[in-house]
Amino acid sequence: GGGALWGGRFASGPADALAALSKSTHFDWALAPYDIRGSKAHARVLHRAGLLTDEELSGMHKALDELAADVASGAFGPDPGDEDVHTALERGLIERAGADLGGKLRAGRSRNDQVATQFRMWLRDATRRVGSGVLDVVDALVAQAQAHPGAPMPGRTHLQHAQPVLLGHQLAAHAQALLRDVDRLADWDRRSAWSPYGSGALAGSSLGLDPDAVAAELGFTGSSANSIDGTASRDFAAEAAFVLAMIGVDLSRLSEEIILWATAEFGYVTLDDAFSTGSSIMPQKKNPDVAELARGKSGRLVGNLAGLMTTLKGLPLAYNRDLQEDKEPLFDSVAQLELLLPAVAGMVATLTFHTGRLAELAPAGFTLATDVAEWLVRQGVPFRVAHEAAGGCVRAAEARGVGLEDLTDAELAAVHPALDPSVRDVLTVEGSIASRNARGGTAGDRVAEQLTDLRTAVAAA
Ligand code: ARG
């Protein structure tokens, strides 16, 4: 084709079917601003290596700045004949700088090192945006937790009532997971912040160009230690896809709880009208679509990770065209999270918690049985025996259809001689929660400290 970057040894242009298959401008246009920044940096090292005069460098930069402005305004875009964003932008440069000057920029670089560098640049910016969206969800969770100090709820394992916990403790558990995801992004960035520019097609550049100068200009901490690895590796993309999928999964687990909590059977929360949807036929319906879309999209994010890993699995070094398939899954994961995160943050921030209902359910299902066993342990009873005795209390209470706190002195003593009436001191939700006061426990002071620490971590992230 007319604008192709590789026509010299071919007698004919590509078949239409190949051109259609090969084309990537409909998605890789997202890299255009990064390609132009890379070109400006590359022009500078060409100049420093004596391959561009002062005048040529300034002419090149002027043309690239014009091109950047035209890309930003939409005045310049891909043509049907352009294979990819790099091809299109070289055409745009030549249109502005002329073929003699414009044609000099390609010396010492390849689309293989260009695309590997620019995709990293795009991902580094995108993951920063995603991270800040995740922090907004963490903020909303912490705000809800702090708005309900001391509110108990049933803590669950196996979805069965287990032990009472504070609502704030449960919400903070989700916040902790999401904060680790933000930390993963920061850690990913540290590992991914090196520039493959200068790797050329695979073997490095022979023109005396300085890869570290380009890296520094583009905001990287360094350049590739190995030009083959620089152009062939995509573990940075796979790892980012994993962290993005993990964020999706963590949002999905939170969402699944909200979906359950909003049912009539749970009755823990009411969703704000602005973050729920109706039914086209059932006028009474109020549906948790935000949470359901979070749960649904998490599958898609996992799919993007799995697809990319599968693409990479059998690839020999260095560049293979298969690698063009690396971008769409990441573009999609980021786009989905950018839609999802503000909606989830808004949904969480506007939830109404029914604390009366939560408090009423907190002791239901004999959730204080563990407290009976631990009270017996404090009386010197071995835990194995104490567990058995507390189970006997549950059996007695269940048989009479009452709560543990309703057992008579005689019934308690019949279960185990050590069970005197003072055991009732621990048979309250408040007492149970307050007693779990070691680090990480659900006691009010501990949860308050945890929420303060979460706020500090969000502010520092
Ligand atoms: N558009 C390609 C990609 O996304 C980069 C071009 C490399 N093509 C090539 N034939 N070496 O990976």
Image (cartoon, rainbow, N blue to C red):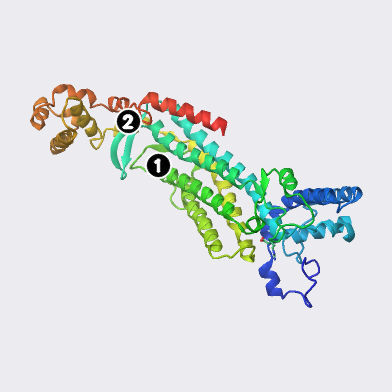
Image location (x, y in percent) of residue 303: 50, 57
Q: Residue 305: x percent and y percent?
A: 52, 56
State whether residue 274 appears in this view.
Answer: no
Comparing 434 with 59, the one in front is 59
Question: Residue at the bottom extreme?
Answer: 11
Position of 356 compared to 424: left or right?
right
Location of ligand 1 given as a quarter of the image: bottom right
| Residue 112: mark | none
The kind of residue tagged 1 is: Ala
Measured as percent of width and height from the top left, residue 93 is found at: 83, 56
Placement of 93 over or under 388, stated as above or below: below
Dividing the picture into quadrants, the one containing residue 365 is top left
Spot occupied by residue 188 in the image (x, y as percentages of width and height): 57, 45
Q: Is residue 377 visible?
A: yes
User: Which quadrant of the rendered structure holds the C terminus?
Assistant: top right
Quadrant occupied by the N terminus: bottom right
How packed mark 1 is, by other alpha carbons closer than 10 Å (few <14, some 14-19, many 20 or more), is many
Residue 173 in the figure: left or right of residue 409: right
For this view, does 252 lie left or right of residue 383?
right
Q: Which residue is mark 2?
A: 359
Mark 2 vs mark 1, CA separation in Å? 16 Å
Residue 220 versus residue 16 in the image, above or below: above
Extreme residue toward the right, this view: 55
**Which is more N-terminal, label 1 or label 2?**
1
Residue 262 is tagged as 1
Q: Around disc 2, counting alpha carbons within 10 Å, would you say few (fewer than 14), some (14 to 19), or many (20 or more)?
A: many
Task: Give the residue type that dot 2 points to.
Answer: Ala
Instruction: Tell me the element at label 2.
Output: helix
Q: For this view, does 248 lie left or right of residue 377? A: right
- The verdict on label 1 being within 8 Å of ligand 1 is no
